[in-house]
Amino acid sequence: MSVWGLSALAQTGSIRINQVGFEPKAQKTATIESAADAPWAEAVLLCQKTGKEVWRGKAHRKATSAISGKVRQIVDFTPFSKKGDYLLVVGQEKMNVKICEHPFADLSRAAVKAFYYQRSGMPIEEAYAGRWARPAAHPDTAVAVHPSAATSHRPAGTLISSNGGWYDAGDYNKYIVNSAFSIGVMLGAYDRCERYFKRLDTNIPESSNGVPDLLDELHYNLKWMLTMQDQDGGVYHKLTTPNFEGFIPPAECRQQRYVVAKSTSATLDFVASMAMASRYYQKYEKAYPGFSSAALQQAEKAYAWAKSNPNVFYSQHVINGQYDPDVVTGEYGDRRFSDEFFWAATELYFATGNPAYREDALQHMPQAYTSASWGNVAELGMLEWLFIKPLADADRAVAAAIKGKLLAHLDTFLQQVETSCFQSPCGNAARDFYWGCNAESVAWRGAEMMYACLLTGNPAYREAALQCMNYLLGQNATGYCYVTGFGTKSPLHPHHRLAATSEGALPGFLAGGPNPGQQDKGENLTYDSHFADESYMDNQNSYASNEIAINWNAALVALAALLNSPLSN
């Protein structure tokens, strides 16, 4: 390896830059940490193979962080567009720079493949997983009905089969709310990038069945979700152990697993994701016979239950006060269901054409435009109104109003770029940082920008999406590339039981990111910084900043695919 190679680049030092790669014609910037009175930084770009200088320039502006007060300098080497491997050198420090046509291709593939590693109830084989292979665990063929979920036809203690699905996050439980949200995000990306996903080979057991790998992966979880529906149409909130398992391999887990309490939120999220799925799997009846019709049938049955039970909240505190055993795993609680009713009715309308569902959707359509999260799913429905084709005349008027709200929502963030410390439409205010912000505040914002680009053709939105990706991949306050297995400084110790009990961090997972709440401080952790954008630790115990989760990876799947895909199907 050249003296300019990777071995010399273990730390990022003062250079904050996308550590994965730039498209030749894309904006290319780096942020330099500096003192307020420091002279303008001079940067040099060297050919990694020969050491020859190919570009030289000075920082073109300074920016002061509204979060920490730190002053940073921005270097812009956008005019240099020749493909190759380079080093950006500032003073005594250097960082890799790669310029190529499809810099996020491997990352996109890995982000989808991450869901295979999360599969429950089947062996993860060496042919597909390499050194992260593991035996089958959590078959979930004898799951007990928790007293909170008991009915006359399924009394407490009844054993049911609920095999398959994905582990939700760093733990080994399975949650309907987050599963359905993740499905919705990724099916939306599939809809807008179908040609791309049809070509994407992630090397999973189903890769040769004639179905796009993403749909195969989603089906593995959707099939499990169907088992979580009770006979009356309601859907259990989650399948879980009473307590989180320790950091042990999944095959060594011994706690009894339960399906816990039906809820309106879980049921409506189930409705939306199943109705949505019914449309996309119609083409693949040979591989998945009967699934499309079954998904729609069960979605309509679940919607009827939700209409009859519109206020069944999931409150773990209340449940634990009434039933044993206590359950202390992830709650995914919600106290407002208008957004779930809107998403569910929207998907049923587009799956069936039934005007009654349209009426329900319009009744629950929110007035304000807010970014999607597992607890606020309205935007997933709004995006369906924007991209479903063809639309009836009356529906086009609804879509036009939503489009205006989306663009107004995003333009607020576009305005931040030119004063940002990281040339970014995200990460510029303390409110951008919270549990899972790398997904909801960065990756998903980038996906939103791409959707705006598809709707308008305005390249400024795609540039903003690239800037969101740059932020995730290293041009941020910590200097971390937050996707495991990528870059020169990425998380090695995520809060992820599969990683802790196998061969280290599995590739393609997005870490939650800086979280000033620091809810894990009681785990003998000491954060190096209390600034919101620096409150991150690459530590297994830091569940508040360094966990992985399927909904976070879903946002990464969407952004990476949209950036890799042609601008329309």
Image (cartoon, rainbow, N blue to C red):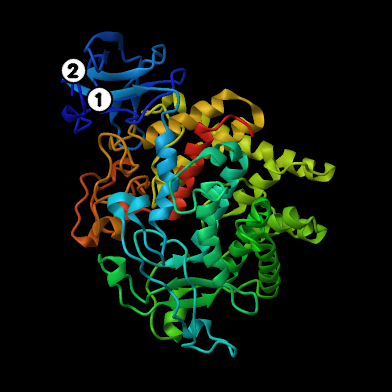
Let me know if residue 519 appears in the view. Answer: no
The kind of residue tagged 1 is Met
Quadrant for residue 47, please give it: top left
Q: Nearer the viewer, residue 496 or 58?
A: 496
- Helix, strand or loop at mark 1: strand
- Helix, strand or loop at mark 2: loop
The kind of residue tagged 2 is Gly
What's the mark number on residue 379?
none
Residue at image location 47% in from the left, 44% down from the top:
557
Across and down, in percent, residue 205 comes to: 45, 54
Residue at image location 23% in from the left, 52% down from the top:
539
Q: Residue furthest right?
A: 393
What's the mark number on residue 91?
2
- In the rendered structure, the answer to whether residue 288 lies left or right of residue 352 reads left
Residue pointed to by mark 1: 95
Q: How far apart in space, not on screen, are marks 2 and 1 (Cα)?
A: 11 Å
